[in-house]
Amino acid sequence: MSWHRANDRLSALLIYGLLASCVLQVPGVAAQQPTDAQAAYRQAVELLQAGKTSEALDLINSAIAAGASDPALYNVRGLAASELGRDQEAEESFRAVIRLAPQSAMGYNNLGVLLSKLGRYKDSAAAFREAEVREPQNFTALLGLGGSLSALHDYAAAAGYLEKAWDLRPGDFQAGYEWALALHEAKQSAAAERVLNQLSAPQEPDQAVKYYSLAGVVAEDLKEYAAASESYGRANAIKPDSYEIYLALARATLSLGAGPSAENLPAPPANLSEKQNLALGLLFASAGAYANAIPRLEAALHLDPKNQAIVVNLAAAYKNAGKPVLAIDLLQQTLKASPSAELYSVLAGLEEESGQYVEAVQTYQRAVELDPANEQNYFDLGMEYLSHFTFGPAAEVFQVGVQKFPASSRQFLGLAFSHYAVREYSKAGDAFTSALELDPDEPAVFQAWKTVLTFLAPNDWERLLPRLKRLATSHPQSAELAFCYGAGLFRAEFAKGSAGSLDQPQALLEKSVRLRPDFPEAHLELANLYAARKDNQKAVNEYLEAIRQDPRSDIAHYRLGQVYREMNKMELASQELTRYQELYSLRQEELKRSRSAIKQFVLSQPAKPGQPSSE
């Protein structure tokens, strides 16, 4: 955020330009002017100082029309015309000063000020540079040139000229402020802070606000949030109606973390717009200051009651503040007036978190009805069924989902898990493989595919193997796809008995662990293959590696125990089988807890007409 305003800089430069211009003589020229011209000049300056700008301009124009040709008169004429907004006349006057006194910096300086005011920064920089060439120690020229270059975003060059201006007048607020600002914009915030530390805050309120605001910005850049908060706080105390300053104060204070909390902030400015209230609310909410966020979001919603983005964020703030009932009520009331798939989806999520599972399903269904082209709505509805173990409806939703969104791997995953949960392993394997084909590089898809690995029958593998082969061939550096094809082929060939060949699956699984050594599933599968080939020592090595990488693998301990038994290493076999029993018991406890959760959800479902109650 920048606290610089072009008009602020130009106003300051204009003050310096006026001071530089209010001299009675231009060296070597003004002393020769006629007595009448001198009198006209003095009288015009008095009129200007008295605020009678139009009278001053009329007087000078009369003198010039009478034949006076003096740079000082043209200079005052330019100042008066500029004051009256007659910029073209002012520019012509200052260029006349330059023509009549080409070695003086005065005309160039005042022309530079005027051009800056008009936003013609390239031209103003050229004028100030001419002034600086003629008078290298001219403070106004250096300050103006630095200001113009800053406006042109040439901050490094600007800082150099502003430093020279500062050296001429150490402690001058405008020079120091402009120099610090240029350094800040040049990403030299530490240097800017050193300059600001040499300045004192001005007594004039607007200038003090500029000083404290810039000090806050610089401190914030340096992550000195306590100093930033203090500076912004001082600026806010002087100008409490500034939204930008208050926003910066809130941001810096919230960045303190363990420092002063948001509750210590002063009240925000009155009469903020909807966008300003929303921005503040989002800032507070992002920092977890929900007590501060809620009033701002409520104010924004009051100003724009139909803004669904505000509704969603206010509902989230209510929820995170421990007021889920208010969040649900807000969404329900909004939906009565303006039904929206997005809001139904948000409401369903809140109902789910509040334990209102049946209501959540119904609400997700409304979202699907209102926006049937939205893939997210189908996924949310399917997952709501799936997460509460109502697998039939879940499968129905995901079956529609894969038809409507055939490029969505997660729709296929939802369908696969729905079939898997009711032991429809063949259908599950097909859906899992479809997801893998759509998103072969996604680790979550591979993890899901492994779910069905040990449950498929040989004829299922015969259907899937051509698809897995194509995947493994098209991704030769994928350890996961080599595993998928190798594991499937191993099972298919092993089921053939003596007619089967394990050479190719062995090569694939060995390639898998070679491509990715930290792959416990592949080590376990390779160990099973070695065991099937009675290569017991290789099997033991792979089982041990699988256990090292995944100590909770109960099946690895069980299989290792069996191999030790075949090798007549009974003590080792007993140790592994005992560990298997321990891990198996732990897994059964986890399954028991899952079944309890299923029962709780099922019991929460209302009885259908004609269906007896469970009580």
Image: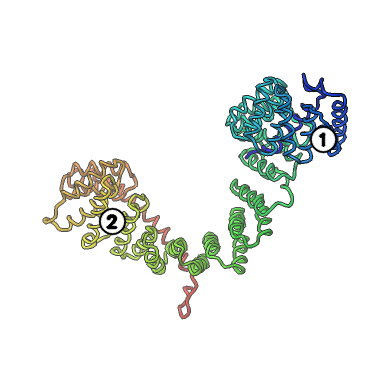
SS for callout 1: helix
Q: Nearer the viewer, residue 425 or 154?
A: 154
Residue 572 at x, y percent in the picture: 24, 42
Front disc: 2 or 1: 1
Q: Nearer the viewer, residue 209 or 61?
A: 61
**Crowding near pointer 2: few (<14 within 10 Å), some, many (20+)?**
some
Residue 1 at x, y percent in the picture: 62, 40
Residue 349 at x, y percent in the picture: 52, 60
Say whether residue 297 is left or right of residue 418: right
| Quarter residue 134 falls in | top right
Residue 537 at x, y percent in the picture: 18, 41
| Residue type pointed to by label 2 | Leu
SS for callout 2: helix
Say whether residue 414 is left or right of residue 73: left
How far apart are labels 2 and 1 at the CA level? 98 Å
Q: Of callouts 2 and 1, which one flags the residue occurring earlier in the amino acid sequence?
A: 1
**Residue for badge 1:** 61
Q: Mark yes or no: residue 596 visible.
A: no
- Colour mode of the rendering: rainbow
Q: Mark yes or no: residue 223 visible.
A: yes
Residue located at (65% from left, 40% from top): 253
| Residue type pointed to by label 1 | Asn
Position of residue 180 relative to residue 419, above or below, is: above
Q: Nearer the viewer, residue 204 or 366?
A: 204
Position of residue 517 relative to residue 337, above or below, is: above
Query: How many marks are shown on the rendered structure?
Result: 2
Instruction: Please tell me the numbered disc located at residue 453.
Output: 2
